Amino acid sequence: MFPPEPRPRIACFHGGGSKGEIYRIQCSRLASLLENDFEFVFFDGPYTRDAGPGVLPAFRGYEPYKSWVTNDSDGKELIDGSGYDDVGRDGIERVLKLMVQNDREQDEPAGPWVGAMGFSQGTRVVGGLLLDQQRRAASGWDANEGIQLKFGVCCMGAGAPLESEVSKHFNFEDNVVSLPTLHVHGLKDWVLPLSRLQYTKYYDSKTKKLYEVDYHHAMPWNTHEVQKLADLIRQIYKENA
């Protein structure tokens, strides 16, 4: 009797003022529908901050709440996610190292990393991973940490993709993510105008898909909407595997 094939993995990134454990709960219905297809792996941002929108009171007691970005001494956001330390453990590079660390922590062979999914601020990590990957590929460089994602899922997102280390040393003309992406927008979400701006400005019209839900600033929870999202994730993976 051969052991089952390991499931492909999707790296998951919470919103600002949340954490991986909270995002796992928020994604529980989706993950249950896809449990035979993918393994969802949840990561924490490096910075501590106050609770984000919609986190309280439901997740009181889950402190510390985390963020993927911070500000410099003048209050200006560090667009590469830096500021955690000076030895490469912040920003996109930190995230990739966390993914590799997850590989090493497995008792059994793990499935390949095939996708990234983020909520709100976490969509900036998703965009940053994809942008770094496509820039490296276009320049003929090896994939960062050997990870080759097939797609990204951006849920109720806002803001530009985080810039990776290579952008500090080279000028790139491509600031638009052209790897396949699925975008989920909430029609009752106060962030909707920013989600639409992110969708229009930072993602290629040829490779992006939009799914609108009748929901607020939260992961889809209504049964038919979660089922549709699960089907769309299966589809984007099948089309790009």
Image (cartoon, rainbow, N blue to C red):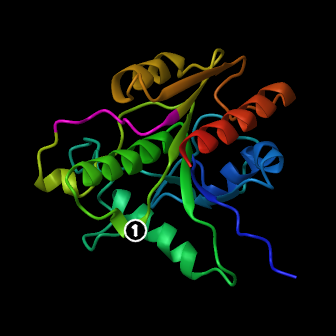
Say left or right for 30 vs 83: right
Segment tinted magenta in the rendering: 173-181
Residue at position x 40%, y 51% from top? 129
The amino acid type of the residue labelled 1 equals: Gly
Give how far across and how far down residue 51 sits, in percent.
Answer: 58, 45
Q: Which residue is mark 1?
A: 146
Residue drawn at x 49%, y 40% is 123
Asked which quadrant contains residue 127, the reply is: top left
Residue drawn at x 55%, y 51% is: 115
Could one spot residue 199 in this view of the protein? yes
Is 61 located above or below residue 51 in the figure?
A: below
- For this view, does 79 lie left or right of residue 64? left
On screen, residue 34 versus residue 161, left or right, reads right
Q: Name the residue furthest front.
A: 1
| Count of residue discs | 1
The image shows residue 199 at horizontal and vertical percentages of: 44, 24
Residue 227 lies in the magenta stretch: no
Is residue 90 at all visible to an observer of this figure?
Answer: no
- Which of these two is toward me, 71 or 165? 165
Secondary structure mostly seen in magenta is loop
Residue 133, image x and y in percent? 34, 52
Question: Is 53 rendered above or below residue 38?
Answer: above
Residue 45 horizontal/vertical position (percent)? 49, 57
Q: Residues within 10 Å of mark 1 (few under 14, many from 20)?
A: few
The quarter of the rendered structure image containing the N terminus is bottom right
Residue nearest the viewer, comparing 90 with 139: 139
At 29% from the left and 59% from the top, the residue drawn is 83
